[in-house]
Amino acid sequence: MATAELLVETLNQLSPEEFQEFKTLVELETGSVLTSSSRPRAGNMQDVMEQMVKMYGGECVEKTKKIFLKMRRHDLVQRLSATDSRAKDKLAVVEEQPLLNQRIAKMSSDIKLLLETLEEL
């Protein structure tokens, strides 16, 4: 299961009031507004998680657990802890892809420059 899916499933355990509290705590930590809607819908929860994954990357699960601790939702912290290592592994693979693409593009550019230089010699 992907990290965002795991986190959305975990957020589904929150009441509407708890979800609003969760969003507020995330916004206080990040200093940015997550979504414009305050009603907890599956799409809204998905949006929140996607934004958190973008902001925190591999630390997303840890940040979410920290917020759940502030909310005194230890049951959700335990749920995330049980699957944390598998989720981090999958997220790490997803995060490496853009970095790899950037490195390939840079190397291709360098090779092209080297070939042009060799032709001039």
Image (cartoon, rainbow, N blue to C red):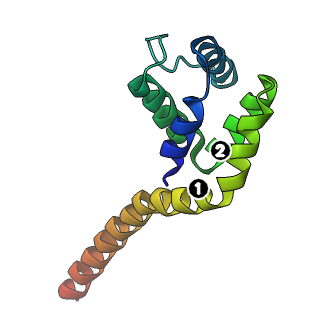
- Locate residue 9 relative to residue 22 in the image: left or right: left
- The residue depicted at 29 percent of the width and 69 percent of the height is 109
Residue lying furthest left: 119
- Locate residue 27 relative to residue 70 in the image: left or right: left
- The picture quadrant where one finds residue 67 is top right
Q: Position of residue 82 (x, y in %)?
A: 71, 53
- In depth, the one of 82 and 60 nearer the eye is 82
- The residue depicted at 53 percent of the width and 49 percent of the height is 3
- The residue depicted at 73 percent of the width and 30 percent of the height is 68
List the residue tagged with mark 2.
Answer: 61
Q: Amino acid at mark 2?
A: Val
Element type where label 1 sits in the image: helix
- The picture quadrant where one finds residue 27 is top right
Q: Position of residue 84 (x, y in %)?
A: 67, 54
Q: Position of residue 46 (x, y in %)?
A: 44, 32
- In depth, the one of 79 and 120 nearer the eye is 79
Mark 1 in CB contact with mark 2 (< 8 angstroms): yes
- Vertical relation: 69 (above or below) 121: above
- In depth, the one of 106 and 58 nearer the eye is 58
- Locate residue 36 relative to residue 84 in the image: left or right: left
Element type where label 2 sits in the image: helix
Looking at the rendering, in which quadrant would you find the C terminus?
A: bottom left
Q: CA distance from mark 1 to mark 2?
A: 8 Å
Q: Amino acid at mark 1?
A: Ala
- Vertical relation: 82 (above or below) 108: above
List the residue tagged with mark 1.
Answer: 87
Q: Position of residue 66 (x, y in %)?
A: 76, 34
- Vertical relation: 2 (above or below) 121: above
